[in-house]
Structure formats: C-alpha cells, structure tokens
Image: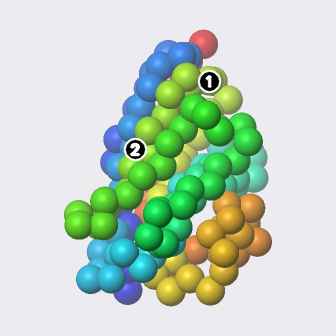
Amino acid sequence: QVHVVESGGGSVQAGGSLTLSCFASGSTFATYVMGWFRQAPGKEREGVAVIDNDRDGTTHYQPFVEGRFAISRDNEKNRVHLRMNSLRPEDSAMYFCAADPDPQWRAHDYLTGYADYATWGQGTQVTVSS
C-alpha cells in the first residue's frame, strides 16, 4: 500500500507564497499520477493540480490557480511539490497530496474529480490572511 505524507503548510499574508511537499512510498513512483486537492470548511473538495506519469510530466491546473501555482515531481526522491504564489484568502484550505499508483484514467480526469485517487495523505493546512 502506498503511503503519502504532506508537509509545508502554514500561514501567509495575501500575495505571499508557500511551497507544499509530498512524499509517496513505493518503488515505482515514476508510474504514479500525482496531484493535490483541497477542502475548506463547509465546502466541497476541489482538485487543484495534477502531474502525469508521462515522460514530460504533463501538468494540469484548475483555472482558479492557473498561472499562480506550479506542480512538479522528483521521481528520484518520490516527491511532488506544489509551489503556490500570489496566494489569496480564498486559497485557505486543507491541502491533500494524492496518488494513483496504477492509473486507469487520463490525468485531467483526476483534476476534475471524474477519477479518484487510490490514496492521499492527512493534509496540510494553508491559511492566507487579507
């Protein structure tokens, strides 16, 4: 079973930046589709970004983070990062790193919620103050 652990959350003022990191266990990390989703109190879970397991590490973003957030992966270290710039108060949420070690769907399907990940971490809190 793949285990996922996030780190890097915190509090920041609007306009600031944070980088979230995630470690996923397993010897075949390069084949995992990896992503981040978030959930704020009283709101639905929403996908944020996905990075594919293809050679180019193709990325997909929700429109509300496009141009501000960047997802990347380091297959040598089993890590995924989410760089978040120009943070807004509405970005405040619990952020979860998620993995599908045996993806059966297109990477974009994980972003929209059409496909679900096999596992995710406990989450890390991001709070953006105005």
Q: Which mark is residue 20?
A: 2
Q: CA–CA distance between discs 2 and 1? A: 16 Å
Numbered-mark total: 2
Tell me which amino acid carries mark 2: Leu
Q: Secondary structure at mark 2?
A: strand
- Residue 40 lies, in percent from the top left, at 65, 43
Q: Is residue 115 left or right of residue 122?
A: right
Tell me which amino acid carries mark 1: Arg
Asked which quadrant contains residue 129, the reply is top right
Identity of the residue drawn at 37% across and 80% down: 2
Identity of the residue drawn at 35% across and 76% down: 29
* Residue 125 visible in the picture: no
Q: Is residue 45 left or right of residue 127?
A: right
Identity of the residue drawn at 54% across and 61% down: 58
Residue neighbourhood size for the residue with mark 1, other residues' Cα within 10 Å, grouped as few (<14), some (14–19), many (≥20):
some
Q: Is residue 91 left or right of residue 114?
A: left
- Residue 75 lies, in percent from the top left, at 30, 67
Q: Residue furthest front?
A: 56
* Residue 83 visible in the picture: yes
Q: Which mark is residue 88?
A: 1
Q: Secondary structure at mark 1?
A: loop
